[in-house]
Amino acid sequence: MTRNRKKKLAIRAEADGGSHARAARLHTPAPKEILTAEVQDRLINAFQVEGWPVETDGFPEGGIWTGWLGPVWSMLSRPGGTDTEADPDDPDHYDLTTVPELTLIAPKIPINSGEAMVLTLPGTAPLTEIVHTVWEELGRARATKVDALVNDATCSLCGDRYPAAHLLPATEHDRLVLCPFCVFDGDILGGHPLRLAYLIDALTDEDVAAPAGWSAVTALLACAAGPDFRERLEGDDGTLRLPLPHWFDPGQVWVWLPPGDLPPALQALGPGTSLSTLVSAVEAAHPDLRDRFRAEVVDILEEDEEDSPPAARDYLVEQLWPASICYAVTTATQFRERPHGRSPWDLLSDGFEEGTLADYFDEIGSTLNPHSLGPVFTLSIGVPLISNVLGLKPDHEN
């Protein structure tokens, strides 16, 4: 009896355990499916909200969702697939409960220059954490690359030293290579902005340490361009790449902010931001900025009243105002990142010549007339004023 009773108890315990195990399985929810399409949408939106210019194909290619977040290339994929051509949300080819993997690389095209930043993060990480991590690592990567630059060439006009790849020809002649602050100088003849546009894109796409000032040149040309600029740029001979969206939407221009302490207006923007976000931040902090510009122009004209047009005229060209803000910020960026070079503030004092601007504006189909003084005043007076208001220009440069 005892042996039989023990056996019955053992069988009952085993049965009860199995019942509990089955019940546990029945009441445990199945692993949640994670759709990569939703992860990608949330990622893109998170960087848009933070003010970064973003692009995406809108579909996965080769099982990978691709995005371009400012100067960063993002790839979202699902590990463990058997068919790289399959949609990563296809349950016949992928386990949809597998956490997608997010890879972020800078620069966007690292083939020739190498990767300055590579981050691998789970696609399900909190979006605030992803954005903050990219901010920090991107700023660190740029600083490291800038510190390692070798200045082995000189700008053909100002003589300032740069890495050879950072100087670009603004005309048809390859020997006349310029820094960003000499492109619109009065000594430039026969400017070729269509060619320059592609060269700027190639440089900034491939080099995370490219001079910040090239963003300002991009902003000025894009802001000044006329309605047929796209047709002119796409029809330019000898180019193998499509023009980037910022040439037709200046708000998408990527702007590197000065490293180190920033004024309150810029502190929430990370290492860089889109031009539209930058302009909004500056004007929200200083809503009287335009009026201060107008007052500055009046003071200057009254000092030279004999040779100047009537001071009552409004010389602010709204179309170029974002470019002026971009120049103010990127000039400060270059001043801090290149402390041993010539002061970009000095170069800007003669950096906008109406005849040279007229040549460039004609090539890009602009409707602006530099000889009316509005464009020249907006840039030559507006840039230092904005810099002073933001507190970006050192006292000894004023």
Image: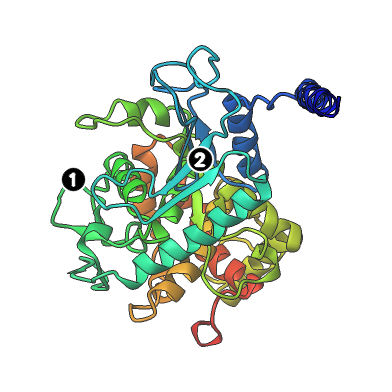
Whole-number angstrom distance, CA of label 1 to CA of label 2: 42 Å
* Residue 366 horizontal side relative to residue 179, left or right: right
Of residues 33 and 85, which is closer to you in this image?
33
* Residue 218 horizontal side relative to residue 18, left or right: left
> Residue visible at 39% across and 80% down?
339
> Residue visible at 54% across and 22% down?
95
Query: Where's residue 239, x and y in %?
Result: 24, 32
Q: Residue furthest bottom?
A: 396
> Looking at the rendering, which quadrant does residue 390 occupy?
bottom right
Which amino acid type corresponds to the residue marked 1 in the rendered image? Glu
Tell me the number on the disc at residue 172. Answer: 1
Tell me the number on the disc at residue 102. Answer: 2
Query: Where's residue 157, x and y in %?
Result: 24, 67
> Residue visible at 41% across and 35% down?
244
User: Dot 1 lies on which element?
Assistant: loop
Q: Is residue 375 above or below residue 230?
A: below
User: Dot 2 lies on which element?
Assistant: strand
Which amino acid type corresponds to the residue marked 2 in the rendered image? Leu
Q: Is residue 101 above or below residue 396?
A: above
* Whether residue 397 is visible: yes
Query: Where's residue 220, x and y in %?
Result: 46, 49
Q: Earlier in the sequence, mark 1 or mark 2?
A: 2
Q: Residues within 10 Å of mark 2 (few under 14, many from 20)?
A: many
Query: Where's residue 349, x and y in %?
Result: 43, 71
* Whether residue 308 is visible: no
Q: Is residue 300 above or below residue 172?
A: below
Of residues 113 and 19, which is closer to you in this image?
19
* Residue 188 horizontal side relative to residue 288, left or right: left
> Looking at the rendering, which quadrant does residue 309 occupy?
bottom right
> Residue visible at 38% across and 37% down?
364
Tell me the number on the disc at residue 369. Answer: none
